[in-house]
Amino acid sequence: MDRSRPTVRQIQYFIAIAETLSFNQAAKRLDVSQPTLTTQIVAFEEALGLQLFERSRAGTILTAVGRDLLPNARRVIEELQGLIDQAASGSRGPAGTYRLGVTPTLGPYLLPHILPALHQRYNVLKLSVREGAPRDLEAGLANGEHDLILTPLPVDDQRLTVAPLFREPLKLVLPADHRLVKRKNINRRDLAGEFVLTIDEHHHFHQQIEQLCVSLGAHLRRDYEGTSLDTLRHMVVMGMGIAFLPALYIRSEIHRPDELRVTTLRGGAVERTHALAWRASSPARGLFREISDVIRSLVVRDLADDLVPIAARKSRSG
Amino acid sequence: MDRSRPTVRQIQYFIAIAETLSFNQAAKRLDVSQPTLTTQIVAFEEALGLQLFERSRAGTILTAVGRDLLPNARRVIEELQGLIDQAASGSRGPAGTYRLGVTPTLGPYLLPHILPALHQRYNVLKLSVREGAPRDLEAGLANGEHDLILTPLPVDDQRLTVAPLFREPLKLVLPADHRLVKRKNINRRDLAGEFVLTIDEHHHFHQQIEQLCVSLGAHLRRDYEGTSLDTLRHMVVMGMGIAFLPALYIRSEIHRPDELRVTTLRGGAVERTHALAWRASSPARGLFREISDVIRSLVVRDLADDLVPIAARKSRSG
DNA sequence: TAAAGTAATAGGTTAAACCTATTAGCGACG
DNA sequence: CGTCGCTAATAGGTTTAACCTATTACTTTA
């Protein structure tokens, strides 16, 4: 790249002199000495390879090319000022577009309860939300694809700070014609031999259900795996098995008691824990910690029926 | 103005690092050392008051604000590059918008013969034409309002370079019912006692006619002065007097022999001399001299019937 | 002709941009 | 578990260039 590039300073000097048509006046306005302007304009002219001003002992006027270049010079300074302004608004308080990664089994059902309040509290904060499997979220956080992720625990990477938010029960969902539908309470041992549906193995959710089935003595239906919680729900309705679905999903999407029976399994909680995680080195870590607190208090206020809050300040930094 | 303003260099460094996500690679691409980048980016970040990159020993990624600032930074460089490009195209060969001042009694009738050829020869040359009385043209040239003027002689200012172009006869124009219309030749003494019309006194043209009238023994009609050559023509048609009109005007605007009789006065040329003039200090003086030559050759080629060419290299520099 | 203005030049100072060499820390591999 | 190869940061010194004051050369105005 050219080393003799024009300087921002030179462009500003050019504009000031073009406006005052006087090296002396421009020097006063810019608070530099007149010889400085002379040498800088000479350097600028040499860098551009043309003459900007016609100087005489009597005064200074623009050349034709100088006149034509002036608007362009002004645009450069304008863009630079825009950069500075934007930076200034970004340096006081949270700003910037942070990339939030979420699990597809939680994000769509939690974020509608969270984002409005966040937007209200940090009104220059922008979040761009992307879905991804927890494993991908964690990798994406490490390599800068995400700035913040909303993920089920556990998170292993020691370079990440993890702030647990809440526990989410996984509720038992039965088809309307299931043999256990009439039972008031359903215990763990009642599910031995049942066929349990789940989504495909890329999701953390899958592993959890798999382990649950082992402990229940139930069968995981590997031949019919849903690609989303919605397809899973449809499969249950059609009688292909039973399923455990996250409480927030149920709150959001299941409204027809004649189709499905939703209940809680007795004898030991079936649940998953969600956390917010970010790079320990992130300059926005203070903001992210605040966001964790905001989410926790929103959970207590709005979602206590379905979720189990976790007290703040339990987060672990790697 | 802020002295700790960001530097063009810093912005380029910022962009290069953002694109390579590596101080080392960016350093190679920019052909500077890696420590230079480190210190410059630190300075840039301090100037903006925020953090652009998240650095670790493992690598570098953009922060959220850095990501948002990047397009803006690119725009600054883009505008600057535009400035340099425009300057480069302007520095080789004539370019820029030169402001040409012309007399209203010549410009509209000469320029249509001149401008197309000039445009063809110097295709990046742009002329913005303004009319003004010769006195104003001269002053406007001195103070930078014009870069070049097309004016009748004499021009006194010693700081100007004057290139005479051609002599333009002033032809005698009579109304169709004038007593001299039938005469084959009209001599100077035939006009004694005639009423001669002219335009208002701000024009150089006026003085010339005034002197002519004195030498002819004719009367200058001060009570009816036209504001343009066209009104003058109308006044002649209506029988208010006779007039001397520039040959180029007649060539352009007078086509009805039944209305007016146009002839040449015998016994001593009645004419005016036109010249191109510019500031002797103008950086475009070489171009202007070339333009003078172009106009002279066009006069010889296209307008020899009406104008008297003047050989080149007779110009006088003050 | 003097006074007040213009921009350019000379000479020296200061700030900053830059270099090389080194250090501190992370990740991968044997 | 140490080593090698990578990362960016730091240290110390050099060079560049931006800047100042003082002066000069010249023009316009009083």
Image (cartoon, coloured by chain):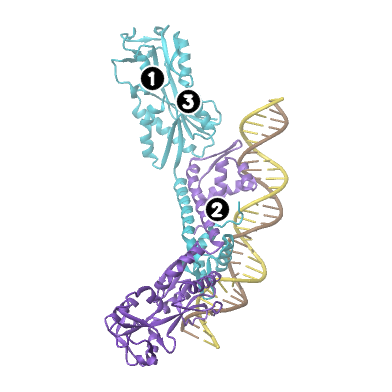
Chain colours: A cyan, B purple, C yellow, D brown
- Where residue B204 sits: x, y (%)? 40, 82
Q: Which residue is mark 3?
A: A133
Q: Is residue B235 left or right of residue A46?
A: left
Q: Residue at x 48, y 24 (%)?
A: A153
Examine the rendering and report whether any part of residue B104 can be seen: no
Q: Nearer the viewer, residue B62 or B280?
A: B280
First along the sequence among labels 3 and 1: 3
Q: Give the SS element for disc 1.
A: helix
Amino acid on which disc 2 is placed: Val
Residue A58, labelled with which disc?
none
A283 relative to B176 in the view: left or right: right
Near-viewer residue (B169 or C21): B169
In this view, the mark in front (3 or 1): 1
Q: Quarter-wise, where is residue A205 in the image?
A: top left
Q: Nearer the viewer, mark 1 or mark 2?
A: 1
Q: Quadrant of residue B192?
A: bottom left
Q: Quadrant of the C terminus of chain B?
A: bottom right
The answer to whether A303 is drawn above or below residue A287 in the figure is above
User: Which residue was labeled with disc 2?
Assistant: B8
Q: Position of residue A241 (x, y in %)?
A: 39, 11
Element type where label 3 sits in the image? loop
Question: Residue A65, relative to residue A239: is it above or below?
Answer: below
x, y percentage for residue D12?
70, 50
Q: Chain of mark 3?
A: A
